[in-house]
Image (cartoon, rainbow, N blue to C red):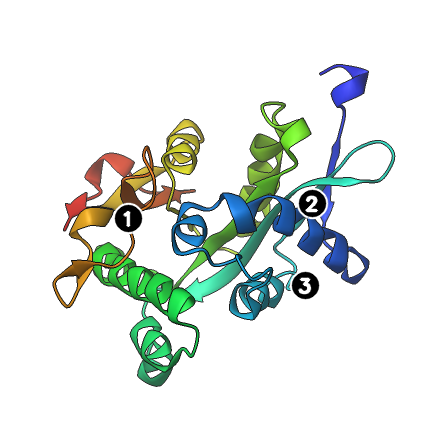
Amino acid sequence: MSKETTFTVLPITANDEEEIMDLLKRTFYIDEPLNEAVGLYDSGSCLEVEEYCRDSLLKGLSFKAVEPKGKIIGTMINGICPLEDEDEENSLLNQALRCPNPKFQRILHILARREEGAKLAEKFPSDKVFVDIKVAATDPHWRRRGVMNELLRETENITKQRGIRILRMDTSSAYSAMSAERLGFNCIYKAAYKDIKLNGEPLIVPKEPHVNDAVYIKLLSGSDPGTLVHNKT
């Protein structure tokens, strides 16, 4: 790697929070296909998404990529989640039904269908938790320079240190799905957006090439990915 493209990957600290949020506002918030399709940021902000991103920032599993002058040019926000959520009251479906934001409500319905289709608890009955890559973003000027590779490397290391073997990445875009496959993840759920319906109508249909919603996982030890079941709905 040349001197001009050198960067360092470090854990996120409390002092990084606002700079991370600024990076997400310039990348993830506007680039993510579901957000774009429903016009989630037409009014300039969405508190629900911002709360989702902030929730895991300071829990010791999230990382930043920093260029030589100290600017944050990439991030991977991760959280530990149970394979089977016993809090039915706070399920994604119930969150969708309670959500006052009609645009975000449609996204929550997509996420609820995704969770129902992935069936992680059935596929991995011996595991209790997994690490979820909630958000990954790179400054446009630093893309294709290995930033995501290094952020993922640190995420895998901390996941192993926590004694967790399942790493999960949900993909709403064709590009993130290609990245997941390039990074060694395996698809366990895929559904065409046109087929994910509520009251007989598709919930959200993003612009092509973003035609599928998917869940990818990577087993970090002890299992053969070839045994995974690939569900389609």
Name the N-terminal-most of marks 2 and 3.
3
Q: Which residue is mark 1?
A: 205
Is 196 left, or right, of 5 in this rendering? left
Residue 189 or residue 124, whichever sits in front: 189
Above or below, 225 against 113 in this view is above
Q: Between marks 2 and 3, how big is the CA–CA gap?
A: 12 Å
Q: Secondary structure at mark 3?
A: loop
Name the N-terminal-most of marks 3 and 1.
3
Above or below, 14 against 168 in this view is below
Question: Is residue 160 among the parts visible in the rendering?
Answer: no
Q: Which residue is mark 2?
A: 64
Q: Position of residue 119 (x, y in %)?
A: 23, 59
Q: Which residue is mark 3?
A: 58
Q: Secondary structure at mark 2?
A: strand
Q: Position of residue 86 (x, y in %)?
A: 33, 79
Q: Position of residue 199 (x, y in %)?
A: 14, 68
